[in-house]
Image (cartoon, rainbow, N blue to C red):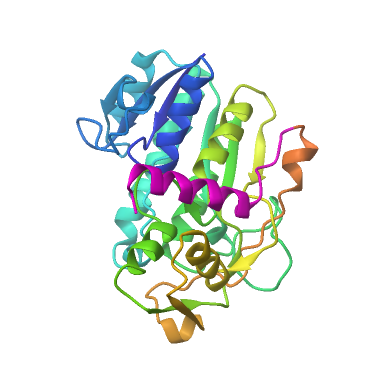
Amino acid sequence: MRVFVTGVAGQLGHDVVNELVKRGYEAVGTDLAAEYTGVQDGTAVTTAPYVGLDITDAKRVDEIITEAGVDAVIHCAAWTAVDKAEECEDLVRKINAGGTENIAKVCKKLDIPMMYFSTDYVFDGQGTRPWEPEDAYAPLGAYGRTKAEGEQAVKDNLEKYFILRIAWVFGINGKNFIKTMLNLAKTHDTLRVVNDQIGNPTYTYDLARLVVDMIVSDKYGIYHVTNEGESISWYDFACAIMKEGGADHVTVNPCTSAEYGAQAVRPYNSRMDRSKIAAMGFEPLPTWQDALSRYVKILKETGAI
């Protein structure tokens, strides 16, 4: 099997390519830059075939994916800067919705499956009930709106599709909350972290395993995917990170989202019903506690923190 993977310079695309190659599949990676710009960690993503591609260029997307001769597309590329999205929604829409539609149309032409990654931000974040895959869209901001539009583009064009809604993502390649917290711990004795946004983290290494399990199957549909374990606040997560990272000298103080004052409104409730994963015969991800322990160990071993 030969798979086209977008966004390989990001956290998820990096791990997806590595997982595909580890399983004996071929991967063709792409991102915006002419050459691979992700972490140079010596893994398969640094040596797999790569092509620079602007996904907003419909003609080029058609040419590159068609010429690649692939059996499926795993679309990891996206605009993910939530606050910045409020300032340039048209540009974000061009990437998250328009770029996704360009890819979906090629997959339709070639009659191959596509996997698209979405987010808890397509919901309004109210209540305490875990969001279910078929719940209605009610995004609060530009990022959520454009990701929901990307979902719709996939559904409008394809029957063979996977939509995976993920949240609180962390991986080896790129920036994330864990790296930020442990780097701040080097220069700060106290930190403020919001305690009124509740959800579950998602480790891209674990997610990539499930992604490959899914893409080689025909169990299409919408799934909610995060690591297992009790849902937590960002404050709870920060405390666990400091403990796991040996930064017990840092005092983490809770605050509300209003007190923190981010530009974009975040969902308070990011709990997601993951039961469909097991119901469809796939193995759920390990607990976030287990994922955090493994991840911090790798960061220490590689000198990333």
Image x and y of residue 3, in percent: 46, 21
User: In the picture shown, does residue 23 fall above or below 162?
Assistant: above
In the figure, 181 relative to 305: above or below?
Answer: below
Q: Is residue 45 left or right of residue 265?
A: left
In the image, the segment drawn in magenta is 282-305
Q: Main secondary structure of the magenta part?
A: helix
x then y, percent, for residue 96: 40, 48
Q: In this rendering, is residue 136 above or below 219?
A: below
Determine whether, in the image, residue 127 is placed left or right of residue 107: right
Quadrant assignment, res 219:
top right
Please say whether residue 289 is one of the residues in the magenta stretch.
yes
Q: Residue furthest right?
A: 279
Residue occupying the point 57% across, 28% down: 212
Name the foreground residue: 6 vs 56: 6
How many numbered discs? Answer: 0
The quarter of the image holding the C terminus is: bottom left
Residue name at image x 30 percent, y 38 percent:
39
Residue 87: x, y in percent? 29, 67
Is residue 40 rendered magenta in the image? no
Q: In the depicted view, which residue is nearer to us: 159 or 226?
A: 226
Residue visible at 39% across and 43% down?
A: 301
